[in-house]
Amino acid sequence: MPQLEISDLITEVDPHSGRRLPVRRAEVIEQLRESGDERAVRIVARLPADQDDVLDPHAVDRLLISVHTELQRLSEELRIGERLVDLLGPLFTAIRSTTGEPGPYRLVDVGCGLGYLVRRLATTNALGADVELVGVDLNAALVGEAERLARAEGLNCTFVHGNAFDLPEAATVYVSTGVLHHFRGSALTEFFQAQAASPAYAFCHFDIAPTPYAPLGAWIFHRARMRNRLGRHDGVASALRAHTDETLLRAAAQSGIRALLYEPRTMANPFCTTLRPVIGVRPHLEAPLRRALKRDARRLVGPEHLTGATR
Ligand SMILES: C[S@@+](CC[C@H](N)C(=O)[O-])C[C@H]1O[C@@H](n2cnc3c(N)ncnc32)[C@H](O)[C@@H]1O
């Protein structure tokens, strides 16, 4: 039975209107029970619901904000912001040199949650003043909290509630962290296709590397650093659901964009690897990106480097 994440099941929104839909607790419990996850069943059974068994949306929002606040700690400890800048800096250098356009360019963080990445980029101004920073999430409570935190610090960035692929203004580059494993099968291909079909020049999505140690590493980290039972459960479930290098490269390549993986399994120390990015660039950008990355360009591989058996 497939591993499920509780946070995927306890909220539902219409992806087009963004309207919140009611979620019945018994239906969530049934799905989790069918997947054989009795621990998750016990966590959901404790969530408050009304007389019609609809989960209390305010309690769910508070819970998800608290889980994502703990999740931010993971991003800080794994230095995801710095690692993203190590790649996005050269990527924007390549874009500036090939387009000849003065900007502004737009970075869109798909599924930004509490907006840690966008807020960090705004605080450090690491990508330059010509890059607008936009975080988008289908979850109104998370993106509302992201907006509140950014305003409290007077940061120059924007947060939008909705579908990242329905924005009125096109992105130059799409990014995300910890989002890819939520998309399975054809939904993963469609995720990349939406970006390839847009005017964007590139994407860069960080997600969990499925090393043999990832589930144990996730368990230790979440046990030690997270208090919330749902967060602990979903942290380990995410590691178990992580896509292989082959799945990501194949799905990204199907979109027609040049798909690349930075530090694939064959080049990384499995004890130290946590999240690694899949990158997509318009074909004319690959050479300038490699030049801008200098020595690190050797860590960037395409689907042609996969073995015949897994390609
Ligand atoms: C696990 S959370 C990741 C949050 C954040 N990136 C982090 O690292 O803390 C995944 C988020 O992606 C959002 N999401 C999924 N597809 C989306 C889309 N097409 N547009 C905007 N948000 C999306 C979901 O609402 C969910 O909040």
Image (tube, rainbow, N blue to C red):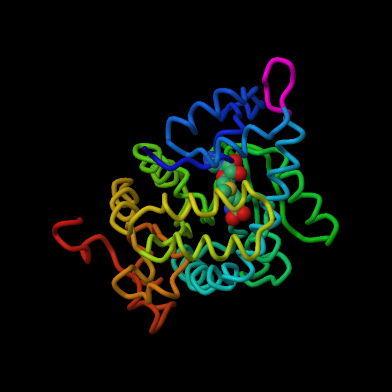
As for residue 50 lying within the magenta part, the answer is: yes
Image quarter where the C terminus lies is bottom left
Can you tell which quarter of the image residue 29 is in?
A: top right
Rendering coords of residue 105 (x, y %): 58, 58
Q: Nearer the viewer, residue 276 or 160?
A: 276
Rendering coords of residue 218 (x, y %): 51, 61
> Residue at position x 43%, y 71% from top?
273
How many discs mark residues in the rendered view? 0
Position of 17 compared to 287: left or right? right
Position of 25 compared to 270: left or right? right
Q: Nearer the viewer, residue 103 or 26?
A: 26
Rendering coords of residue 90 (x, y %): 49, 73
Residue 34, compared with residue 160, is above or below; it is above
Q: Which residues are magenta?
A: 49-56
Residue 164 appears in the picture as rendered: no
Q: Nearer the viewer, residue 77 or 29?
A: 29
> Residue at position x 28%, y 56% from top?
246
As for residue 98 lying within the magenta part, the answer is: no
Can you tell which quarter of the image residue 186 is in?
A: top left
Residue 229, compared with residue 44, is above or below; it is below
> Residue at position x 70%, y 45% from top?
143
> Residue at position x 40%, y 82% from top?
294
Rendering coords of residue 1 (x, y %): 36, 37
Residue 28 appears in the picture as rendered: yes
Position of 283 compared to 131: left or right? left
Name the magenta segment's main secondary structure.
Answer: loop
